[in-house]
Structure formats: C-alpha cells, structure tokens
Amino acid sequence: MPLTVTPIDATLGAVVTGVDLASLDDASWEEIHSAFLAYGVLVFPDQSLDEESQGAFARRFGRIERLSSRQTGGTVQFSNQKPDGTLMQPDEERYRILKGNEGWHTDSTYMPLAAKASMLMALVVPPKGGETEFADMRAGYDALNADTRRTLEGLSAYHSLYNSQARLGYRHTTDNLYGFHDKGAPLRPIIKTHPETGRKSIYTGRHAYGIPGMSAAESESLLDGLMAEACQPPRTYLHRWKVDDLAVWDNRCLMHRARPYNTDHPRVLRASRIAGEPESELAPTFADPRAAAFHPSSSNKSSLTAS
C-alpha cells in the first residue's frame, strides 16, 4: 500500500497509513515531515515499534530530550503503573504529574530549551477515557481580532512547572523520574512564529504565568481566557488510543492534554520528546519563586538536556 495521509475533520491532524515506521526510507520520511508541518499532529495506527525503533523514528525529527534517568533507546514510559506492576497512588509525585498533564500545555516550556516535537505510542489503554486531546494554536491565533493580536505581540510570560503544579494544590519536587526543571523560569513570548513554516500561534499553556507589567490576577485572567477561547472546535482533536497507535505532534504550534480515566486501570504510553533547536526554542531564564521556595539551594541556572 502507498503511504496515505488522510486529514482529520478539524483544523489540525491527519492519519498516516501505508508505512512501516520501523523500516522507514528517506522518501517516505520526507512525505511524513511535510505532513507534520502542515497538520501539526500525525497518527500512525498499527505500528508495533520496540524502544529502539521508536527512538530511531524520533531522531528523524532531531535530538532526543532527556526526560528520565530510566530513559532507554530514546524512550521512556508515561504510566500510572510502577515497575513492580502496582498502580500509583494520589500521594505519589508521578501520579500528580500525570494529573497535571490533564491541563492544556506545550511540552518543556518550563525548561530553558523547549521541546520541538513529542511522540507517544500506546502500549496499554484503559477501557474508558485516557485519550489525548490536541489544540491548534495556529488556528487559535488566526481567530483573534487585529487589536488582540497587536496587544499580545508585545507580551511575554514566565513558565514554571512548580507554579502550574502549585495551582492544582501540589508541591512539586525535582527528581530523576520526570525532567530536570530546577533551572529557573523561562520568559517566552505569548505569540510564537514557527521557525519552519513562518505561521504565528498562541504559545502559552498551563505552565505560563506572570506576564511582566501585569498583576498576578490580571495575568492569570488573560492567560486562562486566551486558552479557554482558543481550545474549542474545530481547532481541537480528541484521539482515542488503540494499542500500537503512535502519534507525533509539533509543540511549536499545538497544545495537548491527557483526558481523565479510572486510575484503577493501567495506562501505559511510551514517550519520546524531541528537543527544539536553540535558535528558536531557547529562552532566557529568571529566578523561579516557586522553585526557590521548595528548593532554597537551587542555582536556577540554564541547562540543556538533549542527546
């Protein structure tokens, strides 16, 4: 079967069939990369990739970001199931991170070097819920009126995982199981220009806070309202996972979120995250009040973690 790209009925997304990602040739890769830039998120059904094959596909997009000390072959499991087979409980750090990820976000904006792309492959799915939803921030920007665009063009916001978790009532602590994010709060423009397509998009998400020149309340109101308005049909796509589905998306123009499910059931997705190019994704970092409160000895210095 020839490689086929079938658009989803939304402003983003396509399903790609007729390709075996474990034996991808250069011509097929070029078609996939073009579709990735056009549609923002691609879904590949029935891909039985092992860790090595998934890591190899991820490296087609760029350098792999280090997410965990348990990372192997360019992948790490995002799961509510622990290595011994038991399920995580609400008082555990990883459980709280997974709950936090149910808010709209872009990966690694709280790091000095934000993510370029992310990839998930479904290994175990719950009987109900646990979907991943995507939102097209290019179309979200296009829907803004001219006055709002002009206002937002001059604004930036800090990004902090400590702050986004605190808003949910969680005290976040840095460990070796999820990222390395005690390096300060990056300051990022609210409107982002895509480095490859030139299209503009809204670039905020749950980690964004503290717009310079605004009070905390004003900033929160603007950012929350902006996301609520942007993340609406037809600018959203809800993907219902089937085992061996693989999805890859462009963090430079999309938001995403996990959807709730009954955590008495396991949900296991194998993740790869691709680091952005420093020319477009590296941001200056500043002292993070939340991180300083939780980790007084933190140096808050910038760091790059990609391989």
Image (cartoon, grey):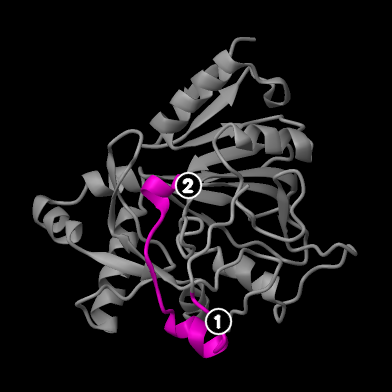
* Furthest residue toward right: 84
Q: Nearer the viewer, residue 187 or 216?
A: 187
- The quadrant of the image that shows the N terminus is top right
Q: Residue 183's spot in the image, x, y percent?
A: 51, 71
Q: Residue at x 63, y 75 (%)?
A: 174
Residue at 62%, 37% (x, y): give it. Answer: 58
Which quarter of the picture shows residue 128? bottom right
The residues colored magenta run 276-300
Q: Can you tell which mark lies on residue 276? A: 2
Q: In the displayed structure, does residue 244 sit left or right of residue 167?
A: right
237 relative to 162, above or below? above
Asked which secondary structure carries label 2, the reply is loop
Q: Nearer the viewer, mark 1 or mark 2?
A: 1
Q: Is residue 52 above or below residue 219?
A: above
Tag 1 residue: 298
Comparing 112 with 83, the one in front is 112
Mark 2 neighbour density, 10 Å: few (under 14) some (14–19) many (20 or more): many
Residues at discs 1 and 2 in contact (Cβ within 8 Å): no
The residue type indicated by label 1 comes to Ser
Identify the residue shown where x is 44% and y is 24%.
34
Q: Amino acid at mark 2?
A: Gly
Residue 235, image x and y in percent? 36, 44
Q: Which secondary structure lies at badge 1?
A: loop
